[in-house]
């Protein structure tokens, strides 16, 4: 029997609920939805990426870990430049939640990268390590 804490969907949903405590905008789980150029100014995506690894004793896991990414997407300014102030504001908001322990998960910051899409949205991808 696989323990519930190893379920990637449960891990994503746990992080989603943490983010929703401080961010009232749109938060999605999994991949970022398709966006129109006028639909949103920002959104956050939560996804478990990579493998869930567990160390087993006999037939049940003792502990394990996985990575979770929180993507912060912000629409660029009218001149096409990155809205660095809003990205920084949302990053600070999210980073204020971690490190934390919730249920049986210990969540800590790992690293981050950024990107831009063809609709003028810029992102910061915050990577966290989940230990359980």
Image: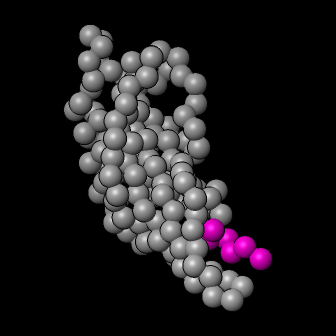
Residue 119 versus residue 109 in the image, above or below: above
The x and y percentages for residue 77 are 29, 17
Of 79 and 41, which appears nearest the observer? 79
The residue lying at 46 percent from left, 49 percent from top is: 69
Q: Is residue 3 left or right of residue 65?
A: right
Residue 2 in which image quadrant: bottom right
Where's the N terminus, which quadrant?
Answer: bottom right
Residue 54 versus residue 34 in the image, above or below: below
Asked if the stretch drawn in magenta spans residue 125, the answer is no
Q: Is residue 34 left or right of residue 119?
A: right
Q: Is residue 9 visible?
A: yes
The residue lying at 50 percent from left, 37 percent from top is: 26
Seen from this angle, which residue lies furthest left?
85
The residue lying at 30 percent from left, 13 percent from top is: 80
Residue 30 versus residue 4 in the image, above or below: above
The x and y percentages for residue 94 are 34, 51
Q: Is residue 60 left or right of residue 69?
A: right
Residue 34 in which image quadrant: top right
The x and y percentages for residue 3 are 68, 75
Seen from this angle, which residue lies furthest bottom?
58
Residue span colored magenta: 1-6
Q: Is residue 59 left or right of residue 18?
A: right
């Amino acid at each position: 029997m696989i323990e519930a804490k190893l379920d990637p969907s449960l891990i994503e949903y746990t992080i989603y609920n943490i983010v929703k405590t401080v961010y009232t905008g749109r938060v999605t789980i999994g991949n970022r939805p398709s966006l129109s150029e006028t639909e949103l100014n920002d959104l956050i995506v939560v996804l478990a990426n990579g493998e869930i690894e567990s160390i087993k004793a006999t037939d049940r896991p003792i502990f394990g870990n996985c990575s979770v990414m929180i993507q912060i997407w912000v629409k660029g300014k009218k001149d096409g430049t990155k809205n660095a102030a809003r990205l920084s504001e949302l990053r600070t908001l999210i980073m204020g939640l971690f490190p934390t322990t919730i249920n049986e998960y210990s969540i800590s910051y790992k690293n981050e990268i950024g990107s831009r899409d063809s609709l003028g949205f810029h992102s910061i991808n915050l990577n966290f390590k989940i230990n359980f």
